[in-house]
C-alpha cells in the first residue's frame, strides 16, 4: 500500500484531471484523512467507507477520502490499480457534489440500492452459516 503522502500526490494528480467548473461550490475542497472508516451499515466489519461528500451550512461543501479504508480494501493492489480505484471514488464523490448542486439524488438512490444488496447477501451468509451441520 502507498503511504498517505504518496496517496495525497495521487489524489492531487487525479483532482487536476477534472475541469475547474466541477469545483464550483466545493469551498472545502478535497481532504485526505488517515482514518479507516467502517461503514455504519457494516454487518461483519467488512464494509468500509472510501469517500464521502459533505455539505452543510456551517462547513460548506467538501469531499473526504479515507486512506485507511483504501489500505484495508485495496492495500494488496499494484499502484496502477489503486490509482484506478482512487479515481473511481473521487469521481463518485464529485457526482454527489454535482447532483447536490442540481437538487438531484440519483447517485444517493443507487448507493442505497447497493447497500440493500449488501444487506441481502450478508443475511444469506448468516442463514447459510446457521444451516451448516455441526461437525
Image (cartoon, helix red, strand yellow):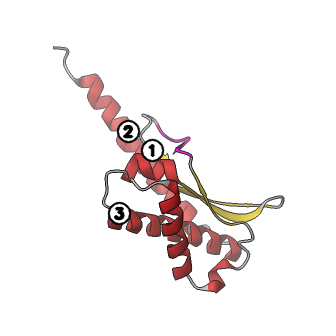
How many marks can you see? Answer: 3
Residue linked to disc 2: 122
Residue linked to disc 3: 79
Residue furthest to the top: 135
Q: Nearer the viewer, residue 52 or 122?
A: 52
- Cα separation, mark 3 vs mark 1, equals 22 Å
What is the x, y in percent for residue 51?
55, 57
Mark closer to the observer (3, 2): 3
Contact between labelled residues 1 and 3, with CB atoms less than 8 Å apart = no
Q: Nearer the viewer, residue 133 or 59?
A: 59
* Image quadrant where one finds the C terminus: top left
What is the x, y in percent for residue 112?
52, 55
Is residue 27 shown in magenta? no
- Cα separation, mark 3 vs mark 2, equals 30 Å
Mark closer to the observer (2, 1): 1
Residue linked to disc 1: 47
Q: Residue at x 57, y 61 (%)?
A: 108
Main SS of the magenta part reads loop
Please tell me how crowded label 3 is: few (under 14), some (14-19), or many (20+) other residues with Cα within 10 Å.
Answer: some
Q: Residue at x 56, y 49 (%)?
A: 34
User: Compared to 8, does 14 lie above or below?
Assistant: below
Mark closer to the observer (3, 1): 3
What segment is highlighted magenta in the picture? 35-42
Contact between labelled residues 1 and 2, with CB atoms less than 8 Å apart = no
What is the x, y in percent for residue 114?
44, 55
Amino acid at each position: 500500500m502507498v503511504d498517505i503522502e504518496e496517496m495525497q500526490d495521487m489524489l492531487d494528480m487525479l483532482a487536476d484531471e477534472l475541469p475547474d467548473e466541477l469545483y464550483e461550490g466545493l469551498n472545502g475542497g478535497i481532504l485526505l484523512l488517515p482514518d479507516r472508516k467502517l461503514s455504519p451499515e457494516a454487518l461483519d466489519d467488512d464494509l468500509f467507507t472510501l469517500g464521502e461528500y459533505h455539505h452543510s451550512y456551517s462547513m460548506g461543501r467538501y469531499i473526504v477520502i479515507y486512506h485507511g479504508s483504501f489500505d484495508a480494501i485495496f492495500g494488496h493492489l499494484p499502484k496502477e490499480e489503486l490509482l484506478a480505484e482512487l479515481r473511481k471514488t473521487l469521481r463518485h464523490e464529485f457526482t454527489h457534489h454535482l447532483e447536490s448542486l442540481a437538487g438531484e439524488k440519483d447517485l444517493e438512490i443507487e448507493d442505497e440500492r447497493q447497500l440493500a444488496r449488501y444487506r441481502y447477501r450478508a443475511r444469506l451468509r448468516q442463514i447459510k452459516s446457521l444451516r451448516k451441520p455441526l461437525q
